[in-house]
Amino acid sequence: MAYPTYKPTARSFDAGDYPVKVFKAQNGSESRILYGSKRTNMKLSLSYENISDLRAAAFSSHYDEVLGTYNTFTLDSEAIAGWDGGSGVIDAVASGNQWRYESPPQISQVRPGISTVTVNLIGVL
Amino acid sequence: MAKVYTGRDGVMQLDGATLAKVVSFSFESSLETLETTTLGDNIRTYTPGVVGYSGSAELLYYKDDAGVINTTEVLNSLVKTGTDGVASTDTVELTLRWVDGSDENDIKLTAYITSANIGAATASLSRASISFTGTGALSTVSI
């Protein structure tokens, strides 16, 4: 089962960083070593407000499908709906990453049959 | 026959008994709307949320020939002695009615009195104002 193909109502993206190790000497001078050429550890937070419980359940099902925070997956273009800056900018795949759940989907019941879901993803190589 | 309703046609009842000397009443229903607009949309969309009812009324402070004051029961739902405050049973059954002969157009609801105001002023009639908030479904809507 693929990640649910619904348009989020809010989205925030953290661009992550390249794998860099920082060494600090006792005198305060700093050396950085670059260990890779691919940016990783980007974070994507998606909110789906006031969706039906059936849709909310799809996120829980997908979380089970990928064994929680164990397996990785890709996102459909719906996840970046409304973004005109190029899909590669806020999708981990363009940097050779895939998404993984950073934490379980949070489902808040708003009223009978209506829920709000928040999903936090992290890009991993 | 065609009819335009006026204040003369208005009746307010408490537990099925008509309240005397009601100057005015109003009723409002509101729907909470939950926004479902998603990223990429240009027009807002909504799904219905919870419906609520509220209203207000104003009565002259009046004692009838039997010595019964018209506002007693409605005010005592909120204005009372003791330290228990308002209990879940302190609801009132209100009927808001527009009458045309034998034709009665009603809104009936169970409500809590959420505010009460009564005063006296020189050269003016004493009045009591109340606000109410409905709890549960309307039992009658025939407007």
Image (cartoon, helix red, strand yellow):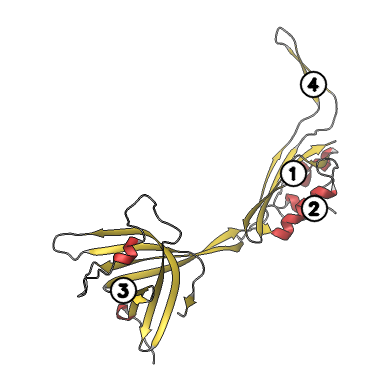
Left or right: residue B67 versus residue B81 is left
Where's residue B68, x and y in %? 24, 70
Q: Tell which subunit mark 4 falls on.
A: A
**Residue sticking out furthest to the left:** B123
Q: Which residue is mark 4?
A: A21
Q: Tell which subunit mark 2 falls on.
A: A
Instruction: Quadrant for the N terminus of chain B, please.
Output: bottom left
Where's residue B120, x and y in %? 19, 59
Q: Which residue is mark 3?
A: B19
**Residue sticking out furthest to the bottom:** B1
Q: Which residue is mark 1?
A: A104
The residue closer to the viewer here, A121 or A116, is A116
Spatial distance from mark 3 to mark 2, Cα to Cα?
A: 57 Å
Q: Earlier in the sequence, mark 4 or mark 1?
A: 4
Spatial distance from mark 4 to mark 1, Cα to Cα?
A: 29 Å
Q: Amino acid at mark 1?
A: Pro
Q: Amino acid at mark 3?
A: Leu
Task: Say what secondary structure mark 3 lies in.
Answer: loop
